[in-house]
């Protein structure tokens, strides 16, 4: 790739290009996520436990697939080319969901297309950010924090907009068309992202992996396409059959551990230290995503059944949300908190006072625990089984700060500790571990499954608040463990840096 072109394009311009396509990709994904559990329960007639597990399995597949997509980007099609292919496939998946049918197999097949598209897109987009800022740890932390904000700008816009589209079209046209109109909006977001990338593509010509330097091989493209079709079929089967989903998640988790074991055994002393540190943080991330999965499962259903959707201050009504829109609180808080946090990282790094990344993870669990204790306070503050919407605002605020300190730095952790030659694949392995925990999060959410026929808020409230309190206690335990391993993490960091 031309060094002249590289010199003429600033890092910020290249970063902006990836930032914007990530924003629109997340617009599509979270616009779908905010509705999918409600769609399965209200439109397809699924029980709570089946909807939670189907979405948990789908989330696991969505997070597992980047492991393969990262390898395709590194070795087969090229990082940049694979990311763009993934964006196109995602648009196709949302287009399928926009078709007015409630056939279960068709839905699962459409979700399978989304799994494949996400696998091709996700790890490669993150890997491009790493390549842009390679070699500067403080800038990498800051860049990935802002990059994480892109995720949440797209998420906030779609999570506020797609529930409104669904309600408006259902009210005006009926027949459940609103659900499919909302999914069509997700497709439109991906098409906008691709259009924007085409306009700015000159800023990325010098960024990519080795295959990006050469013309695309038609045979490799055909093999990837055939593999993608097979993956769609397998994904649909996994979503349909619960035992198959459990076996898949178990195998995926074991695969990550085996991969780490092999790579640690093959590395030199510095590489081993970095990979062990990465493994410890990956395990912590697994626990974090169990909490995170509650936003689209137990917390989403809590908002449907036990939250007053009206926002008011001192008795004055401000506005009313639909239950799905409460999930937008997470990205809204991320947008508020990301810039000052990125600024703090940069300033602290300039003065040599930056917190160790393991300490940031430990602090993240503190705020996650506080968030779930806030949700559980509904047990004492509810009136006739309904709690004020402000409980959700503050609960999401604490949880989102914890998310920034854990998940927001997950990709930065891979960029920091993993050798460049395996970064794309290891980013994929990171997503695999996250996917395993998404399914576990679905199992946890089922602790608060409401039996069919139970609709009274006073009866559903304790089911949810008991779970939230238990999750708060679990968050405290995770915090204590994270702080206990902090000295070991610092020593591994020194060895990795060649200082010990």
Image (cartoon, helix red, strand yellow):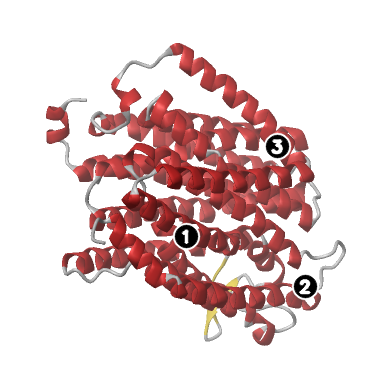
Sequence order check, earlier mark of 1 and 2: 1
Q: Look at mark 3 in the image and give the residue it sits on.
A: 108
Image mark for residue 212: none
499 or 282: which is nearer to us? 499
The CA span between labels 1 and 2 is 37 Å
Q: Is residue 3 above or below residue 397?
A: above
Sequence order check, earlier mark of 2 and 3: 3
Where's residue 111, x and y in %?
64, 38
In this rendering, the label closer to the viewer, 1 or 2: 1
Q: Residue furthest right?
A: 453
Q: Look at mark 2 in the image and give the residue it sits on.
A: 460
The CA span between labels 3 and 1 is 34 Å
Q: Is residue 352 above or below residue 123?
A: below
Q: Are marks 1 and 2 in contact (CB under 8 Å)?
A: no
For residue 448, which quarter of the picture? bottom right
123 or 401: which is nearer to us? 123
396 or 356: which is nearer to us? 356
Q: Look at mark 1 in the image and give the residue it sits on.
A: 280
In this rendering, the label closer to the viewer, 3 or 1: 1
Where's residue 344, x and y in %?
26, 68
């Amino acid at each position: 790739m031309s060094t002249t072109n590289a010199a003429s394009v600033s890092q910020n311009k290249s970063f902006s290009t990836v930032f914007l396509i990530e924003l629109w990709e997340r617009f599509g994904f979270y616009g779908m996520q905010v509705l999918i559990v409600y769609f399965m329960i209200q439109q397809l007639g699924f029980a709570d436990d089946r909807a939670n597990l189907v979405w948990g399995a789908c989330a696991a597949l969505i997070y597992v697939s980047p492991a393969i997509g990262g390898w395709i980007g590194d070795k087969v099609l090229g990082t940049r080319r694979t990311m763009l292919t993934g964006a196109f496939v995602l648009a196709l998946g949302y287009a399928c969901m926009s078709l007015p049918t409630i056939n279960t197999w068709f839905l699962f097949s459409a979700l399978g297309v989304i799994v494949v598209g996400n696998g091709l897109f996700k790890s490669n987009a993150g890997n491009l950010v790493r390549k842009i800022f390679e070699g500067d740890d403080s800038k990498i932390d800051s860049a990935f924090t802002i990059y994480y904000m892109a995720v949440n700008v797209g998420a906030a816009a779609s999570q506020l907009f797609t529930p409104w589209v669904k309600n408006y079209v259902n009210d005006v046209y009926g027949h459940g068309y609103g659900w499919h109109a909302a999914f069509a909006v997700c497709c439109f977001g991906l098409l906008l992202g691709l259009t924007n990338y085409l306009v700015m593509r000159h800023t990325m010509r010098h960024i990519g992996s080795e295959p990006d330097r050469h013309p695309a091989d038609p045979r490799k493209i055909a093999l990837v396409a055939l593999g993608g079709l097979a993956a769609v079929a397998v994904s649909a089967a996994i979503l349909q059959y619960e035992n198959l989903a459990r076996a898949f998640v178990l195998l995926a988790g074991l695969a990550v551990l085996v991969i780490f074991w092999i790579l640690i055994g093959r590395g030199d002393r510095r590489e081993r230290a970095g990979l062990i540190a990465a493994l410890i943080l990956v395990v912590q991330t697994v626990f974090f995503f169990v909490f995170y999965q509650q936003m689209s499962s137990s917390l989403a259903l809590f908002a449907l059944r036990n939250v007053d959707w009206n926002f008011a201050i001192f008795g004055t009504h401000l506005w009313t949300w639909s239950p799905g829109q409460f999930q937008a609180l997470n990205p809204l808080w991320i947008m508020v908190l990301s810039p000052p946090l990125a600024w703090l990282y940069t300033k602290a790094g300039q003065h040599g006072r930056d917190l160790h990344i393991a300490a940031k993870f430990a602090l993240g669990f503190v705020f996650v625990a506080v968030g779930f204790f806030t949700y559980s306070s509904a047990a004492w503050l509810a009136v006739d089984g309904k709690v004020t919407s402000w409980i959700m605002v503050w609960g999401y605020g604490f949880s989102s700060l914890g998310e920034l300190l854990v998940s927001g730095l997950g990709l930065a952790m891979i960029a920091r500790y993993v050798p460049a030659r395996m970064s794309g694949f290891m980013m994929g392995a990171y997503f695999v571990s996250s996917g395993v925990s998404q399914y576990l999060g679905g199992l946890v959410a089922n602790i608060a499954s409401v039996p069919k026929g139970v609709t009274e808020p006073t009866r559903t409230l304790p089911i949810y608040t008991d779970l939230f309190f238990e999750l708060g206690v679990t968050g405290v335990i995770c915090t204590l463990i994270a702080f206990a391993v902090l000295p070991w993490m610092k020593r591994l960091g020194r060895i990795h840096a060649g200082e010990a």
